[in-house]
Amino acid sequence: MTTLYAIYGASGCGRSLMPVARQQLAREHDSSEIVFIDDALIEVASVNGHRAMNYQHFLNETADAKAVQIAIANSRVREKIAQRLEADGISLWSIQADNVILMDQAEIAAGTALSPFVTITSNIKIGKCFHANLYSYVEHDCVIGDFVTFAPGVKCNGNIHIHDHAYIGAGAMIKQGTPDQPLVIGAGAVVGMGAVVTKSVPAGATVVGNPARIMQPK
Ligand code: UDP
């Protein structure tokens, strides 16, 4: 049985996740090919030593099964592509770097990408297509929705709930909640880089600074 694996997106995010994808297959002693999919490509090309093609070309490839990691930082684009893959019967592929630390009872949905030096501690629930970039951590009892994105170095402490499509910027730290009163980052909220989040953030809001405050649209 042959599986064709792909990293969807051959820009910054995709090119950084391809080595993580290779580590994933090497750990599984799987010598299958991994290609890039990028819709900006007209012809089949080569990117960092891997074949690269648009989605239509990928669909035309012959394989018993296909699995795709959507390596695009924009979560709305990830969702759109995930829906298309699902409709085409292609599975979402989860990848993690060799040095990721996963503790007990972490329930993680399909399509996740855990970059080098990420730590996921115990009793955590994570939704579809989560991206945790370099050096981020998720502490105990967090609940993370679908299509959430962590830039590098996010410090997500215990008892925090992060809803769908939230984006947490590089080096942001979020104060821990409590079991009966988790700190909540609402759906689609954006936490600016380096923000120190001390209280819940409403859905759709952007917060910046220390302590983090809502940034009003100009
Ligand atoms: N892309 C694509 N199909 C889509 C939307 C985006 O192949 O429907 C590709 C796009 O051509 C680009 C990449 O995804 O190469 C996104 O790269 P970008 O630099 O915007 O962000 P990154 O997520 O890599 O940081």
Image: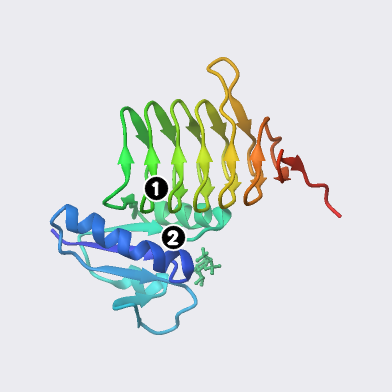
Question: Most extreme residue toward the top, as rendered?
Answer: 180
Give x and y (percent) for residue 69: 37, 57
Out of 35 and 117, give the one closest to the viewer: 117
Out of 156 and 107, give the one closest to the viewer: 156
Question: Most extreme residue toward the right, as rendered?
Answer: 218
Q: Residues within 10 Å of mark 1 (few under 14, many from 20)?
A: many
Give x and y (percent) for residue 214: 77, 42
Identify which residue is drawn at 23% across, 69% down: 62
Q: Which label's residue is closer to the chain start, 1 or 2?
A: 2
Give x and y (percent) for residue 13: 46, 64
Report the amino acid beneath label 2: Ala
Q: Which residue is mark 2?
A: 71
> Left or right: where does residue 94 sit relative to residue 157?
left
Q: How far is the residue under mark 1 from the one under mark 2?
A: 9 Å
> Is disc 2's CB within 8 Å of ligand 1?
yes
Q: For numbered disc 2, what is the local secondary structure?
A: loop
Report the amino acid beneath label 1: Thr
Vertical placement of 66 versus 118: above or below?
below
Q: Which residue is mark 1?
A: 112
- Residue 22 numbered mark, or none: none
Identify which residue is drawn at 43% across, 53% down: 134
| Number of marks drawn | 2
Q: Residues within 10 Å of mark 2 (few under 14, many from 20)?
A: many
Vertical placement of 167 versus 73: above or below?
above
